[in-house]
Amino acid sequence: MEQTFAVIKPDAFAAGLAGQILARIYEAGFSVVGLKKIWLSEAQAGGFYHEHQDKPFFADLTGFMSSGPCLVMVLEAPKAILQWRELMGATDPAAAAAGTLRRDFGTFIGRNAVHGSDAVETAAFEINYFFAGLELL
Ligand code: DAT
Ligand code: MG
């Protein structure tokens, strides 16, 4: 089994899409081993997205991610990292395949509804950034 870190971002949460997205997660066969609602500060969002701190979109990204509550999750499946990236679709909703979450629920690249870890190392960092071991059940 593998674990990945996922977020229902503030745009999707504010739009009332959390229930539909969770249903798609369960339908795809993931176990939800961690789940909580949080509201990040801009600094906390910056720590999460530290790999992008030199990008031109960093301030927009951290401002958006701290603009309202989101749901953070740890998902488990045999190939959870890749499977969740596939269910999310491409970063830009306009380029995401039909039937993916970003295609269905994203607005544009800066409001793309969901996050997912991209590798084993980033999944480990992101899970530990948001969850204590005792919260993963
Ligand atoms: P992903 O979320 O697919 O892993 P990423 O790690 O490259 O994509 O970027 C993190 C987030 O930053 C992404 O979900 C949306 C935002 N972002 C990425 N590229 C962007 C761009 N060119 N303009 C605006 N926002 C961007
Ligand atoms: Mg990424």
Image (cartoon, rainbow, N blue to C red):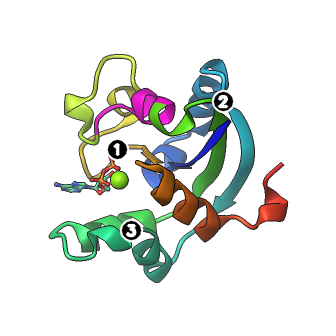
In what quadrant does ligand 1 lie?
bottom left
Q: Which mark is residue 49?
A: 3
When the figure is inspected, residue 44 is found, relative to residue 103, above or below; the finding is below
Q: Which mark is residue 112?
A: 1
Residue 112 magenta:
no
Q: Secondary structure at mark 2?
A: loop
Residue span colored magenta: 83-90
Q: Which residue is mark 2?
A: 30
* Mark 3–mark 1 distance (CA, rounded to whole Å): 15 Å
Q: Who comes first in sequence, dot 3 or dot 2? A: 2
Residue 39 shown left or right of residue 48 in the figure: right
Kind of residue sitting beneath label 2: Phe
Question: In this orientation, does residue 69 appear?
Answer: no
Residue 91: quadrant of the picture: top left
Of 59 and 11, nearer the camera is 59
Q: Residue at x 32, y 49 (%)?
A: 111
Q: Secondary structure at mark 1?
A: loop
Marks 1 and 2: CB-CB under 8 Å? no
Position in image of residue 107 (x %, y %): 29, 39
Q: Residue at x 60, y 29 (%)?
A: 25
Mark 3: C-beta under 8 Å from nearest atom of ligand 1? yes
Dot 2, crowdedness within 10 Å: few (<14), some or many (≥20)? many
Q: Dividing the image into 4 quarters, which one contains the N terminus? A: top right
Kind of residue sitting beneath label 3: Tyr
Kind of residue sitting beneath label 1: Asn
